[in-house]
Amino acid sequence: WYQRRVREAVVSTQSTGSSGINAEYGDTMLRLLSLFLLGIALGHSYHIDDWLTKFSAEEGNENKAAEGKIWVVLVAGSNGWYNYRHQSDVCHIYQLLVRNHAIPRTNIVTMMYNDIAYNRDNPTPGTIINALHASDVYEGVMIDYMGEDVNPKVFLDVLAGKYVSKGSRKVVKSTEDDIIFVNFVDHGGPGILAFPSGELHKADLDSTMNQMFEGARYKQMLMYIEACYSGSMFTKMSDKMGITAHTAANADESSYACVMDDDLNTYLGDCWSLNWMNNTETIAPGWNKETVGQQYQIVKKMTTQSHAMLYGDLTTIPNEPLSTFLGTPGEKRWKMEMGEPREMKSIQSQDVMVDWLRRKLAKENNEEAAEELRRQIKFHEDKERHVEKAINAIAEDVLGAVDAVSSLKQVPLVINHAECNKNVMTGFFSACHTRIQEHPYITKYLNTLAKLCNVYSEDHILASVARFCNAN
């Protein structure tokens, strides 16, 4: 009805004679404005993604996996210019999925803070370039949740198909016949994935995945996770749930940022993410000929800085073709502008922020601004030392001996008690006034706290946390 009334109003304007157009014009434009506002109201009532269903259908490929659909959740869980690479990675895969793999936009939920494209440090406002091609990947990306709406609760509600009152309100409306692909890119810690505000804990992710499994909310789920210590989120995941997680790092190590752009003074991508996207582009359009397991083996060899890992279902999903999760070729291939080959210089993701500050200092000519940068660098260097000192003191207090702390650090991390890990980490962040997003370097020392939960009660550990955080 709305579309018909707009057409009628337009026809009315077009059919008005030259002598009467001025008299009719104002009334017609008022009608158009009223109808436009009504359209917005209707869009909010029935969700903008319902209207977009028609738009996506016009793109061609509905991309159903077997009898069901493919649903995609893309998350860049950080903000700030020094984290440029996370939003670049997510925009890059969005373009691949929509333009090359013909996944309908209505089936993709995108979460990113959206502070990079128009950041004051961006010399080309409205663009985000990717590391593989130096090509803009921001244009056309439909962001469903941005700013403070990019948080753990919204992510879990989106994944589980629960009602969300924020953003576009788009969620994964999957059934037992559907495929889900999740790509998360950000900082991480032991049993933690970071968001701009708050942390997603393994205990909460486990709970949501269990509910989805028991509620038959998917047929198969593939998760690609780019984060430090990302393996720690899945080391205990059942192989019976129809979920496979491919991670950039194991449970005990950092992931790495790659490709420094000197003009932008930031890293453009993450090493593991660039490797799997590069492989996906290289084999195009043969996504039905390479399996999930084959891509894992290829990317594992390509990723030399950290250890790419595979968890969960290691028998069925790894033998599925990539097209099961990433879609099949669309009618029109996306041709990106090819830039000059870039050096794959890498750095631990934990150290990127302080490295960025030092690079800014080296280029700063204003003494007042330079002094402020020196102050910030010293603050973070002091903060890292204080956190390391506090965690060592906590561990020594809990274990009762310095030698025991050294021995504990040599034990590989497996999170056996996810709730304890969640409560201890939350208590530590609060008592020591620190967060992964603001102080990513602290993740170098958090494994020690996580391992304590495998031996001691959380009350015992939290008592030490309160005592020694206050002392430091």
Image: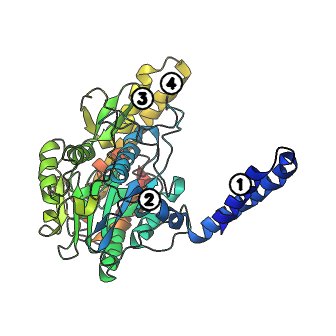
Relative depth, front residue between 296 and 321: 321
Label 1 – label 2 distance at C-alpha: 24 Å
Which mark is first along the chain, 1 or 3?
Answer: 1
Place residue 102 in its image quadrant: bottom left
User: Pointer 4: what residue?
Assistant: 371
Q: Residues within 10 Å of mark 2 (few under 14, many from 20)?
A: few
Q: Earlier in the sequence, mark 3 or mark 4?
A: 3
Vertical position of residue 48 compared to residue 85: above or below:
below
Residue position for label 2: 58
Q: How many marks?
A: 4
Q: Nearer the viewer, residue 360 or 109?
A: 109
Label 1 Cα crowd, 10 Å radius (few <14 / some 14-19 / many 20+): some
Question: Which kind of residue does numbered mark 2 sit on?
Answer: Glu
Query: Residue at the spot x=11%, y=69% of the render?
Result: 315
Question: From the viewer's perspective, is residue 471 above or below residue 238?
Answer: above
Instruction: Name the kind of residue labelled 3 in the image.
Output: Leu
Residue labelled with disc 3: 264
- Badge 3 marks a residue whose secondary structure is loop
Disc 1, disc 2: CB below 8 Å?
Answer: no
Q: Which residue type carries mark 4?
A: Glu
Foreground disc of the pair 1, 2 = 1
Q: Are marks 1 and 4 in contact (CB under 8 Å)?
A: no
Left or right of 165? Residue 97 is left
Which x, y percent locates residue 439? 40, 46
Q: Label 4, secondary structure: give it.
A: helix
Give the foreground label among 2 and 4.
2
Residue 98 in sight in this render: yes
**How much space separates mark 3 and mark 2, taking CA atoms?**
37 Å
